[in-house]
Amino acid sequence: MSAHPVKDRHVRDELLADGRMVLFHPTTRHVVTLNPVAALVWECCDGHHTEDAIVAEVSSVFTNTARVDVDVRAVLKDLREKGLLADAR
């Protein structure tokens, strides 16, 4: 069964005009800039989408991205390691 990633409720995000997104966690003071693909991954982290559903969503929007599955899972892993994501229970 695939995890249901959810954003840490303390993280602040801001979408930039070019499609990138900036994340800031006030407790850990992590600042992360996401490219447009990773920004979509972040937006899908609502606790309702599984990792597989996020991969499917990103694949449907970014049709010319060759390694969507690997890239999405790498983004999720990185966000978890930085304390920006958890898994919904």
Image (spheres, rainbow, N blue to C red):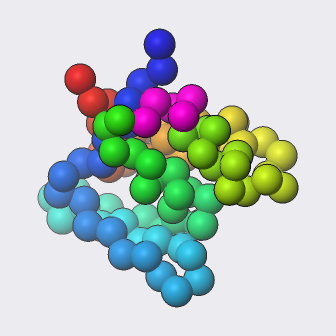
Q: Nearer the viewer, residue 26 or 53?
A: 53
Above or below, 12 relative to 55: below
Left or right of 70: which side holds 23? Answer: left
Judge from the rendering whether residue 85 lies leftward or rightward of residue 18; answer left or right: left
Count of labels in the image: 0
Residue in front for this viewpoint, 13 or 25: 13
Give the farthest residue toward the front. 60
Left or right relative to 21: residue 13: left
Q: Residue at x 44, y 48 (%)?
A: 44
Q: Is residue 35 above or below residue 80?
A: below
Residue at the outermost bottom position: 17
Examine the rendering and report whether any part of residue 29 can be seen. Answer: no
Q: Residue at x 51, y 51 (%)?
A: 41
Q: Pinpoint residue 14: horizontal percent, then vertical percent.
A: 36, 75
Residue depicted at 69% across the width and 36% down the height: 70
Tell me where the magenta segment starts and ends, as one range.
49-53
Report the magenta stretch's main SS.
helix
Instruction: Judge whether residue 50 is colored magenta.
Output: yes
| Image quadrant containing the C terminus | top left
Q: Position of residue 65 (x, y in %)?
A: 79, 52
**15 vs 30, nearest the viewer:** 15
- Does residue 48 appear in this view? yes
Place residue 35 in its image quadrant: bottom right
- In reply to whether residue 30 is colored magenta, the answer given is no
- Residue 57: x and y in percent read 60, 45
Tell me the residue at 59%/83% (across/down): 18
Query: Relative to 39, does residue 48 appear above or below in the rendering?
Result: above
Residue 64: x percent and y percent? 84, 55
